[in-house]
Image: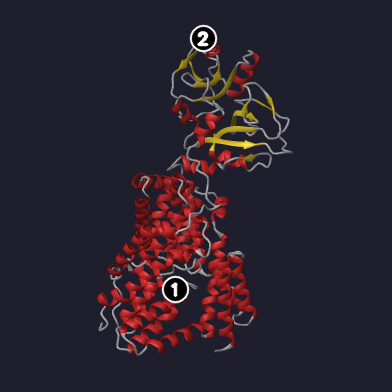
Amino acid sequence: MTPHILITFAIIATMVLLFVSNQVPVAVVALSATLVLYATGILELSEALAGFGDTTILFIASLFVVSASLDSSGVTTWAGQVLIRYAGESRTRLLVLSMLLVAFLTALIGSGGAVAALLPVLVIVSVRLKRPPAQLMMPLAFASYSGSMLVLTGSLVNVLLSDAASDVGLAPFGFFEMTVIGVPLLAGTVAIVILFGDMLLPVRTSREMPEDLSHHSRMLTEQYKLFDQVYQLEITAASPYRGTLQAVLESRLERENHPELSFIAIRPLRQNSISWQHSLVEGDRLIMRGEQAAMDAFAEQHGLTPCQETVGKMREALFNDSHGFSEVVLPPRSRLIGETVFPGMVTESGDLIILGVQRGGENLGPGETVLAAGDTLLLQGRWEALEEYGRDPNVLVVAAPDMIRSQARPLGAGSIRAIVILAVMVTLLATGVVPRVVAGLAAACAVILLRVLKIERAYRAINWNVLIMVASLIPLSTAMYKTGAAYLIADTLVAVVGNASPYALLAGLFLLTALIGQLISSTATTLIVIPIAIASAEAVGVSPRTALVTVAVAAAASFLTPIAASASLMVQGPGGYRFGDFWRMGLPLLLWFFLVGTFLVPMLWPFAG
């Protein structure tokens, strides 16, 4: 055993201990391992940093962007509502439906893409149903590993094994040949999660979980008493306000001295949303607040007709796909402190209107208010304008407008474009017309160019912790190749089981593949084990095809750690998982995969081949 092999084993052991201890950030551990491989001379600098230029990293980053586009446009909210509708309050139905769905998507686009697409849906479902996210996220990832065995293109590992079969003179695997083994793997995974998930999965809430904002608009309108004593007055042909702009209207109201009335907004005749840069015409409506007697007198005096309309319709006029609410707080030293405002006042930019002002949780009157630190303002306007105003350093946003819109307005603006882009990406990934990284990057660019997602939100959507982890672990695979550590392990296994029964050989190959596969990617593991599987199978007179299928099953069983598969890394943050959480749920699943790979595989692919 060479010194470099010993160093490689020591690095792996130290990494695992640090991951389990949860005392050092996993990204720092992974980066440190890469630096040690370079410092000890095991890898050249280009080899140590090669992971950061790997196409896998770009593909995963593009999936985060596409996933964010589905979230921001309300598609994930809609999908979550559909899932909740069919699952109801049943934990079993929710898990079964989500696991079957992710398995189906994995068969089309791979594990990483499927989990990235459905992860925000499960986040929304978890928030709405008030279920611990740790009970839902890990099953999503694990079901995707089973789904990778449903068809040939479900995993790059299957393609590599098919190529290996061709290289030794066997027929390549058919597109649905793996299905007969993938179905029982998936069925067993679902059954184990349903039966033992309550005991084996942690009950923990992640700090990354968003707040449930689906009813935020209703809460704000109630808190600010927005629709208390609110009336709509329609402009008639006799009204002196015809042709008047809002600024002129406000000045006229002030001159006419109506302190008991508060103007809110104009609702144009042919629009369902409000406006304040609009010249009044017959049929337009003024939304105002005040005592009914004063409102009736005002309407009669100015040729206005009171309109009876439900609160729901008025709320829809203020809160819809194009317009919404945002609540902001004035921090100390804000330049707005000392400014005079009133409900119905348009902001300096002309894009937003102030609907209400509170101080100490109490609504201030309809008249003018001199702003003080800690005051909260309820703003209304276009969603884009609300997001822009939220970046003003003079205010603090209570809840991000984009989060409110995505949760409260399912299938909102850009949702159709986001769905079409996703469908095109899935088609490209399923057919293999272009490399998967090209499909992912094209989709990420499309959601930005077609204005489904802003570039700033795209940058924020990328989980850099996952990217650093994956990029830092790729050089570890190179080190195991270069030092001969992987072949040392494999040769030892063959020496132990080479002359035993064929079942012992399959068991040994499974354990070897699964052991390495908990530490490095399944693709790298498969490349290491393929020559060992073929050579050992031929040595004991077993069909290499049987051995290769067992390797495929074992390579999909990355259950015990979150570091070998991107899907596990993706769910680790939203699920609030620690490194040691994975083996508890993963161990019985690994045992199921072992039984299938060792005993069921030779029934379907006989030893004699």
Q: Return the disc, 1 or 2, that comes first in the chain's sequence.
A: 2
Question: Label 2 is placed on what type of residue?
Answer: Glu
In the image, residue 553 sits, relative to residue 415, either above or below, namely: below
| Residue at numbered disc 1 | 523
Quadrant of residue 173 within the rendered picture: bottom left
Return the x and y of residue 528 as percentages of the image width and height.
45, 80
For the residues labelled 1 and 2, the Cα–Cα distance comes to: 78 Å
331 vs 160, left or right, is right
Return the x and y of residue 21 as percentages of the image width and height.
58, 67
Q: Alpha-carbon neighbours of circle 1 within 10 Å: few (<14), some, or many (≥20)?
A: some
Mark 1 lies on a secondary structure that is: helix
Q: Alpha-carbon neighbours of circle 2 within 10 Å: few (<14), some, or many (≥20)?
A: few
104 vs 31, left or right, is left
Q: Nearer the viewer, residue 401 or 491?
A: 491
Residue 435 seen in the figure: no
Mark 2 lies on a secondary structure that is: helix
Return the x and y of residue 473 as percentages of the image width and height.
54, 71
Task: Count up the numbered dots.
Answer: 2
Return the x and y of residue 205 as percentages of the image width and height.
52, 52
In the image, residue 175 sits, relative to residue 296, either above or below, namely: below
Question: Label 1 is placed on what type of residue?
Answer: Thr
Image quarter hosting the N terminus: bottom right
Q: In the drawing, what numbered circle is on residue 265?
A: none
Quadrant of residue 355 within the rendered picture: top right
Image quarter hosting the C terminus: bottom left
| Residue at numbered disc 2 | 300
Residue 375 seen in the figure: yes
Q: Are marks 1 and 2 in contact (CB under 8 Å)?
A: no
